[in-house]
Amino acid sequence: MAGSDDAPLYLGFDTGGTYTDAVLFSEERGVVAKAKALTTRHDLAVGIAEAADRVIALAGIAPRTIRLVSMSTTLATNALVEGQGGRVGLVMIGFSETDLDKDGLKTALGSDPVIFVPGGHDVHGNETKLDLAALENALPELATSVSGFAVCGYFSTRNPKHEILARDLIRESTGLPVTTSHELSSKLGGPRRALTTLLNARLISMIDHLIAATEGFLENRGIDAPLMVVRGDGALVSARFARERPIETILSGPAASIVGARHLTRLDDAVVSDIGGTTTDIAILDKGVPRLDPDGATVGGFRTMVEAVAMRTFGLGGDSEVTIADGGLDPAILLGPRRLVPLSLAALQHGAAIAETLERQLRAANPGRMDGRFAMRTGVPDRLAAGLSTAEARLYEKVTATPLPLDQLLTSTAQVATLQRLVSRGLVHLCGFTPSDAAHVLGRQDNWHERAARLGAELVARRRDGRGQPIAAGAAEISQRVLHAVTRRSAELMLEAALADDGLDGAVIVAGPLVQRALDGKAGIARLAVGLDRQVIGLGASAGLHYAGLPALVGQGCVVPEDADVANAIGAVVGQVRVSAEAVVTQPVEGIFRVSAGETISDHRSEDDALSVASAHLRDLAREAARRAGSDDVEIDVATDLRIATIEGQRSFIEASLRAVATGRPRITLR
């Protein structure tokens, strides 16, 4: 694009499950250069440095001329979809054990420890006596078996005092990270707030690792520029802000992709579908603005209190696990939701051992259930392996940084479940056949190891159907069927997302016989058709491949913009800082108006005084939050939702909710 060569340059990153993308962007010139590198989960700095060095070299600039660095990531989203994260101690203040049964909290907690503590507050912020003895007694053991803590108090959004006392005790006793629920949300609903806090605590080490790796790279290259991170609503926040609240980076990558899609296509109305290595993220662009989810983001089956783009995330991508349904004369190809390290990528990184093992398995007279599967360590620090059972620790000790075939690693059926638990903890990766391998077999992707992909495809093709016959004639046929399955499943997910946005049960409707028959294009007396009302914007490096056959299935065209492969990285640098603060005014007794805003509580004699104080305090909170989030020049809007009743002709105050939103561009390094 035309423009001044002196225009400020911004470096945008997107660290995905498979690739790390980098762009150099100028507000005058647009995309100056772009590059990709493999995401290196064992040391994220390696992939980040490789992508950034490539894009800087392509642009021919000095690193010190970069004035802003911004990144989006799918790591937090992928972790929740795949059930990964650190082991966390959950502290529930004023709750009972039955509260774990609400909002999926027990499922999310799994085997992680929970401590119930007497205390909490009522709706007006009045406290019940706090007793931290149970927590104090548990801390010595927990200090060595968890990676962090989550603290949630009853009505802590109205008075956070007890959460703060518990937080301070934990930090003093253990030195471990602590997340308190009032810092993340001002909404009522204790169990869901506890769920959000628990997930935040699980993600802290992962996001901290990512940010530290990025900061280390910037320092090594002499790039003295603010580092920003994309939040789940598409807004930018400082790295420090994101470290404290990593849960808000769920859907970071997808949110950045929506911002990037709008910037690249200028389409106001579209279904945006971003297919990556691990997930497909689908959102609706309406009148130029992405729709936000008013009830909080849902990821990995958990409904959180995180305000984010109304994005539906599905476990479908180029690196999705390919499995064959058991039984049946024509067994279906199943995809995801788990990500595997593709065989072609594993062979590229680890040499001929992968292909040699696949050849050995092909020489066997009959197919084995563990054929084409390997396990390897993810490379996370050993401290994150705290709390393993004896069986888990014994198996983990056998797994190395080099992929080991499962038919040699596992010696009993019981170890299969043990291995799955290690995968869920984020300690072990599985390698196997994926759509990326299928693309290599068919010559539609050529950056990894084609021979390993073909051998893996042959192992899948010789699996037996219900008649005892191979399910496919060879590697090419099974690969073609896998890629078709990705396109078909993509169409289903887009229709599901559209129906859900219309207020219907999209998953049930799409799985039903009428929609399936319409997608199959089967002829009949009753002619059936289903489609979208707007175009699709396809994003992701493989969008052109997997979405080529999409129009026939969804009845609309699919636009894949020129820079679709780095839309997330573009979205990371064109966004704005946007933060909010909330307050509530209640009337605990007649004539007393109580303001609860952040960690401040004050009583006032009149409604007007209380509202005025709340509004002024909120502006200060929003301005300070914006400063911490990375912007010094912001506009602040305060909205008030006043609830009143008229009783016998008299106006009666019930409650007021206030929300301040501060918006501005991130600060950049001045030259």
Image (tube, rainbow, N blue to C red):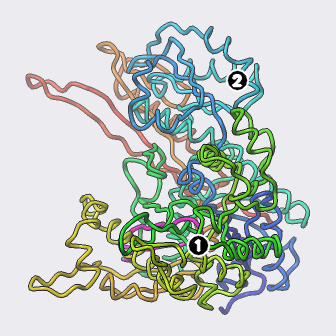
Which of 420 and 232 lies nearest the eye of the viewer? 420
The chief SS type of the magenta part is strand
Picture quarter with the C terminus: bottom right
In magenta segment, residue 276: yes
Q: Which mark is residue 434?
A: 1
Q: Secondary structure at mark 2?
A: helix
Percent from the top left, x then y, of residue 101? 40, 30
Name the residue at 54% across, 14% down. Answer: 117
Tell me the distance, in whole angstroms, between the alpha carbons under discs 1 and 2. 39 Å
Region of the chain picked out in magenta, as a range: 270-287
Which amino acid lies under the numbered mark 2 shown in the image of this protein? Answer: Leu
In magenta segment, residue 424: no
* Residue 574 visible, this angle: no
Percent from the top left, x then y, of residue 624? 63, 42
**Residue annotated with mark 2:** 142
Q: Which mark is residue 286?
A: none
